[in-house]
Image (cartoon, rainbow, N blue to C red):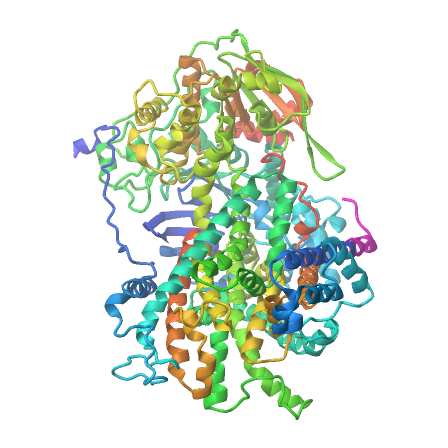
Amino acid sequence: MIKQSKGVYYGKKILLFILSVFLLSAAVFFISRLAPGDPLVSYYGDRAERMSFQERQWAEEKLGLTDSLPVQYIRWLGRAFQGDFGISYKYKRDVTEVIGERVGNTLILGGIGFLLIFGLALLLGVFCALHEEQLTDRIICRIGIVTSCIPEFWLSLLLILIFAVNLKWLPSGGAYTVGGAGEMGDRIRHLILPLLAVVTGHLWYYAYMIRNRILEETRADYVLLARSKGVKKSSILLKHCLRNALPSYFSIMAISVPHILGGTYMIEMVFSYPGIGTLAYESARYKDYNLLMVLCMLSGIGVILCSMAAQIINERIDPRIRNNPIMEGMEEG
Amino acid sequence: MKEQFAIVGIIPASEKERVQKRKWYQGKPVFPMVFLALIIAGCFACDLIMTKDPAYLDLKNFNVAPNREFLFGTDSMGRDIFSMIWYGGRTSLVIGIVATALSAAVGIIFGALSGSMPEWADGVLMRFTEILLSVPGLLLVVFLQAILGKANVLSISFVIGITSWMSIAKVVRTEVRELRTREYVIVSKCMGGGFFHILWKHLTPNFISAIMFMVILNIRNAIVAESALSFMGLGLPVEEISWGSMLSLSENALLTNAWWIILIPGMFLLITLVCVTDLGNYLRRRFNRKESNL
Amino acid sequence: MAKLLEVNHLSITIGTAKGEVQAVRDVSFSLSAGETLAIVGESGCGKSVMCKGIARLLPPSARIRSGSISIKGEEITQYGEKDMRRLRGKRFSMIFQDPMTSLNPTMTIGTQIGEAVKVQEPWISRGELEERVIELMELVGIENPRERRRMYPCHLSGGMRQRSVIAIALAGNPELLIGDEPTTALDVRIQAQILELFREIQKKRNTGLILVTHDMGVVARAADRVAVMYAGKIVETGTVEEIFYDPRHPYTQGLLQSLPWFSRGKDTLYAIPGMPPTLIDPPKGDAFACRNVQALQIDYEEEPPMFPVTDTHFAATWLLDKRAPKIPAVFSGEEGGKRKKIQGDILLNVEHLTCFFPLTKKTLVRAVEDVSFQIRKGEIFGLVGESGCGKSTLARCIMNICKPQGGKITMNGVDVWDPKSYARNRKMLQRERQLIFQDSDSSLNPHMKVWDIITEPMKIQGMTSPRGSLRAEAAFQMHYVGLDPAYLEQYPTELSGGQRQRVAIARALVTEPELLVADEPLASLDVSIQAQIVNLFRHLQQEHGFSFLFIAHDLTMVAFLCDRVGVMHQGRLVEVASTEELFSNPRHPYTKALLAAAAVPDPRQGTARRKNQ
């Protein structure tokens, strides 16, 4: 094995990252422009339908829609490098500005949600694996399956119905009380219900996954050897099985970023939470190209970064991912 | 006593019929199966069950809480929820099944193709599915639905189906990669078995059990996706009754605290989903069964 | 003084979907310190379950029904997990079959050995722990322990891995080692080294060893005493010499006789008829009766007790009863004349064959390098070598699966890798060459019925059966390979290993090929079943004139079956000779080493060799 220096290793990773982002931007750009639909509608609203031919042409030229697609793309790319991502057709403001206002809110909701899911799923999965097929495990599994089946939007509605409408404990929507912005407690109170919806909706899927992966590992032979050493069952589970189950958990969690993000978008809508979810939904529906582009890039970059992080961590844990096995596979081909 | 020690040689043991101690239903998900059968039967035979015309707008009785006449109450447009549930369930189930059939077909073909191609082509196809997977699914659906315009049952099934085949394709591809090295496939190749012979005879029967539970769970996901789309106002219009479009009225119901409009269709949806999930998990467990060493 | 291990009337059952399997039935034995007890038996006889039962490492579905186990007088049958943990590692340790899977792939060897030490001495300091790990690695013969301990299992060879497993087992200085087929997954030469290592450790530490194996050669080489298990019971126990030279139970006799070693120079092997019974509902009386041509009436009625032969030798057979008729043990294969030299035309000609695999972008593996040999019509050509020597790759090249980078393979004068001549003779090549693999879950498609599997080649080739329907053809072929046509409608999972292998052979025969390439067809089969299959091959050769390329790692089997043998080592064919010549006068040092390492099922020879070393 030729050992790579750390610099080369990370250099390669960064190159790969740049390439992926580049490809992603091209893909989103071309797909969104090739799709039928009238972007002018999102800029001018209903007025677009009443425009004369000349007016349309003038408008399209103004928005840079008359050039061929590759030219448009290159122009977009050039401006993007200078930090100019164009304006949102709908909001008539810089895309970065529109997103900037709201991205923080989504990051708080999605980020905290993701971390909670990540941690709690791990705890719950390990707990269930420790008590495999015992009563506690069965009860948790049952509850888990039911909660994982609840559609997110419906759960959000139920939460609002119970805690906001009937019990009046918590606010039914928004990120903060209008007028009294900035207070910590107020923000947290607004965060509880959406967070609950995000976490409950996703938690079990991952907990069940890690539970099953760990239990799969307990079927391996090395568990028997560890037991015959005299190691405690619980420490075999935590030291050996969990360690071997983690790589696939990390990979799955990384791939799941868009999934959880998508769920967050939905929940933002129900709670009328001012995040980028509503923006994404509107931009896709009304062809707000520049906005859509940046939003897709943002989630794409998130996914790519997470996958890379997962890969780096996994290579630390499992030597088999790091380098191809040399000893085996020759005979069996 | 003497005969006991005579040489008699091999006496073939009489084939004893082993009594099957376990009943056929043991270990099978009985409750989910029964519930699901009831719901499916009820939805497809809705004409026999419905007490009212589900589309009739009874403007005198809107937002009526459940009572004797309107078993599950009426919605804000005065339609009878009890009748709508069965009638709309049919639409939801059809969407679930059509979308899943589409996604399974695309997934199997794509996966089998990718799995049997040379390594570089396989790599390209798999990167492609990964890119699709990295876009939030809902965004993709919203986007496609916006392209297709006004939704109907078929278009919505199409959109859901075409955006949910990736995970099936990945599993099929991994299975095919693995199966390709199995000895019986190699032997079959040596005997001159062509691609389609091997695909049909050797690969399909073997990976079908691996994806069966995913297919079942895809039905669930499709039903959820339909209801979510309709809820956002992108799916079926309110006039076309499905569980999703019924729930799209629930935001208004929040204001009037009409819990039955939110709760009852949702409960039906939930029960169906849980039953389908149980069925899927049963298939998954049957697929890999091994005992713990711990 | 109490014996190291005493097991009395132990019975273990395992719950399965089909019913409760009585895996171990009323087993008693004992072991003294420093002694090696080999437990032999075929797969499914309960030997492995028994060992795990003693160590209490059984899966949850298994239960100890009755009996007692005591270690050094300490009764452990009722012990819970906590008490057992105290004993594990210190009183006894286990070593498992496959070192590949029994080590945790994501932890370094050093950490895993260290963990075992730490269990015994939780307060050990870091430096001391390191010293102990290195000491242990040196003890089991791992060189450069200071560097190796930072390596992961996937970086080590099979022998090194098994040594690490042994180091782990020795960490707590146990008085008893239980080896569950510890050498089965290893190559002959490594196998010999590991057995030698056991000897050394026993000498140094006076450890008792239970060696579970199916290989009579290993038994002869390593054991002091032997217990033969059949259908969950110990049917005979005695010292090695007693078992090998004076077997009393018909099963032991049959087991020994079915080894090729005992039929040298004969045409067929002795094969025990039938198959072991299922233990869900074990037969009354002597479980072996239904496979014993000389079974007594009482064998079907009453279970035989253990009759003493000498102080150390016991056997559970009614033949030892006073009232039993005296039957001389007449087990032997058919006598044959001296083997004829085969002078047929050349069927397959391999010339300077070379085949590489790219391992990484820069390194190549030379799987096969400059190999040349011929197979004549009607000949069985044996190819022997350790795993990874390229013998399977060679078979794949011959079967047009792996493309060779150089050299030429001609069959019946047709160059099989020349695209033009291949295209012209495609049908002929596909029919005349057939492949048989080692029996495994993947050798037959689990979703096809037996008749469908057997007639698959006919369907692919569009051939019509001379016997009318395809089903009739399948039934005919099954009869031909000695399989009951009643299995026609069954799935492979419902058959036993030997039956599955017969199905695979029937499938290969259906197009009436000239050349059968058999890649380790006997590996993973039990001794008595191996004998049946070998006899089938012999029959096919002699009566029907099939030619074989027979690939194996088992020298004795090759010596028995093949006319000529080629020895492969690291991709090269180091020696080709007629069987007699190769075994009586090996030329290449590698062949010599291989022959020396082969475990011969003859304890006297084994001890003699051991003393010489």
Q: Quadrant of residue B8?
A: top left
- Magenta-drawn stretch contains C31: no
Could you say which is closer to the camera, residue C352 or residue B227?
B227
Residue at screen point 35% across, 84% down: B62
> Please, is residue B169 above or below residue A182 in the view?
above
Q: Nearer the viewer, residue C581 or A328?
A: A328
Question: In the rendered view, does C450 fall on the left or right side of C119?
Answer: left
Percent x, y of residue C276:
35, 37
Please tell me whether residue A10 belongs to the stretch shown in magenta: yes
Q: Position of residue C155 (x, y in %)?
A: 69, 45
Decide if residue B270 is on the left or right side of residue B179. left
Residue B240 sits in quarter: bottom left
- In the rendered structure, the answer to whether residue C311 lies left or right of residue C175 reads left
Residue C104 in view:
no
Q: Residue at the spot x=40%, y=45% of the render? A: C46
State which region is magenta: A1-12
Q: Is residue A68 above or below residue C81?
A: above
Task: Say if B227 sits above or below C72 in the image.
Answer: below
Q: Residue C208: image x %, image y %?
A: 54, 47
Residue placed at 39% from the left, 82% from the top?
A: B76
